């Protein structure tokens, strides 16, 4: 059996990712509403907390997991360590005495509890002393109404989370209203700052991107660029040594590292380190998501008939967050890179086969199963294979990130 897993990031007031809500769906024929809540929860728990660790899927951060009524009454969370996840009480739950007893027991045993899609009502008031996080869907409960509730409980220990935050303006509005945590994709839709000067690190990154986008990599040009940035050159040298620890003698110069790696490995390695360098003052999600998208697009490209150029697919995924990383409009940045027309059209207009892969990647990030189904059919891709490749890309990105940050 196949499972569909997507993640939605949860961020704090500094736009730092503190966790991910894990979203489960069953096979291709049950992509959205037909999956029962109980089945979805049990399969997600079995796939990600019994048979494997969530470290790869959540990059070591907190996991938010939905629990429907029967699972809570049956004390299903008690089967797992309290550190495993944050227990989300689904909005479909009825505020019965039986449910309250279960919540009190979970609270006393140290589990972190969250009320999902909370709508203030007298029936739920008695639950509030035993929960830790209250989630408001700002598409259902206006920010102004939520702000009144937050103000009323400002002296409590409750943490308030705003869901469905899609823009920078909405983030600021929720921030001002007193929310502590935020869930949504506003960070991937950056506020356009036209003609904003690039920082020195961003300029270095863009110059490196130009070099790796060339048909043939110019080792001398890359060496000259990296030599101007002490932090980046040290970082590159350190990581190359991590990759080549079996050598009798360590690599002691960047020139030596270039020769050792060769063109293909160097292209990829520069890509990753340059991206992490540029996102040093950004949410870690940007770095992780950009390399995960790159891998996902690359793997998807090999499933098409005929196959697409895997390097083009990789760059499409990687550069899909370039506007967020460098705080510039995507079309302005793409004009400065020697990219193939197919990549340009994919990044700016989401057109062509590469554009379809990018749309599919974004849809998977958002758990937009209807769009996934539509694009999968148009590309003649098996949804179960796509699900496997998505999970593989999450684990691959997490593994790489750990090697980079050692």
Image (cartoon, rainbow, N blue to C red):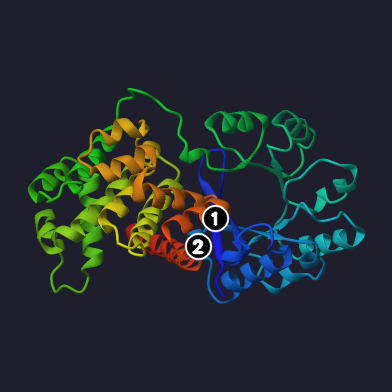
According to the picture, the residue beneath numbered tag 1 turns out to be 7
Which quadrant of the structure image shows residue 153? top right
Q: In which quarter of the view is residue 1 placed? A: bottom right
Q: Nearer the viewer, residue 172 or 333?
A: 333
Residue 364 is situated, as x and y percent measured from the top left of the image, at 50, 54
From what the image shows, is residue 292 above or below residue 14? below
* Residue 92 numbered mark, or none: none
Q: Is residue 276 visible?
A: no
- Give the farthest residue toward the top: 195
Determine the residue positioned at 82% across, 67% down. 73
Does residue 179 appear in this view? yes
Q: In the rendered view, does 213 fall on the left or right side of 186? A: left
Q: Would residue 248 be found to the left or right of residue 278 on screen?
A: left
Query: Up-down: is 404 above or below 210?
Result: below
Residue 217, percent from left and from top: 13, 51
Please identify the quadrant where the C terminus is shown. bottom left
Image point (25%, 65%), residue name:
242
User: Going by the picture, which residue comes out furthest to the left?
Assistant: 220
Nearest to N terminus: mark 2 or mark 1: 1
Can you give x and y, in whole percent of width and height, for residue 393 in the image?
A: 41, 62
The residue pinned by badge 2 equals: 57
Q: Say if mark 2 contacts mark 1, CB within 8 Å.
A: yes
Q: Which one is in front, 378 or 151? A: 378
Alpha-carbon span between mark 2 and mark 1: 8 Å
At 54% from the left and 49% from the top, the residue drawn is 366
């Amino acid at each position: 059996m196949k499972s569909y897993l997507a993640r939605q990031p949860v961020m704090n007031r500094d736009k730092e990712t503190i966790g991910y809500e894990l979203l489960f769906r069953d096979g291709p024929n049950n992509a959205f509403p037909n999956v029962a809540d109980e089945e979805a929860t049990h399969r997600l728990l079995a796939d990600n907390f019994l048979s494997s660790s969530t470290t790869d899927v959540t990059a070591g951060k907190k996991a938010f997991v939905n629990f429907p009524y029967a699972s809570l009454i049956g004390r299903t969370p008690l089967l797992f360590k309290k550190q495993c996840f944050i227990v989300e009480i689904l909005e479909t739950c009825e505020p019965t005495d039986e449910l309250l007893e279960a919540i009190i027991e979970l609270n006393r045993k140290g589990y972190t509890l969250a009320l999902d899609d909370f709508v203030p009502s007298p029936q739920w008031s008695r639950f509030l002393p035993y929960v830790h996080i209250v989630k408001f869907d700002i598409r259902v409960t206006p920010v102004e109404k939520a702000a009144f509730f937050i103000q009323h409980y400002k002296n409590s220990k409750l943490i308030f989370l705003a869901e469905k935050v899609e823009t920078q303006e909405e983030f600021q509005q929720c921030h001002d209203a007193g929310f502590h945590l935020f869930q949504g994709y506003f960070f991937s839709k950056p506020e356009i700052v036209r003609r904003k000067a690039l920082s020195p690190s961003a300029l270095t990154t863009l110059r490196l991107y130009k070099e790796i986008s060339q048909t043939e990599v110019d080792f001398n040009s890359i060496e000259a660029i990296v030599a101007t940035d002490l932090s980046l050159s040290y970082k590159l040298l350190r990581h190359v040594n991590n990759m080549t620890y079996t050598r009798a003698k360590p690599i002691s110069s960047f020139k030596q590292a270039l020769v050792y790696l060769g063109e293909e490995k160097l292209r990829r390695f520069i890509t990753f380190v340059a991206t992490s360098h540029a996102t040093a003052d950004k949410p870690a999600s940007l770095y992780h998501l950009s390399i995960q998208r790159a891998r996902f697009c690359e793997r998807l490209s090999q499933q098409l008939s005929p196959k697409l150029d895997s390097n083009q697919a990789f760059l499409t995924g990687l550069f899909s967050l370039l506007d967020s990383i460098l705080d510039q409009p995507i079309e302005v940045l793409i004009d400065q890179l020697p990219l193939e027309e197919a990549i340009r059209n994919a990044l700016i207009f989401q057109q062509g086969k590469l554009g379809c892969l990018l749309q599919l990647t974004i849809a998977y990030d958002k758990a937009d199963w209807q769009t996934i189904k539509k694009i999968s059919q148009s590309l003649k891709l098996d949804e179960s294979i796509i699900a496997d490749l998505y999970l593989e890309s999450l684990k691959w990105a997490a593994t790489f990130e750990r090697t980079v940050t050692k």
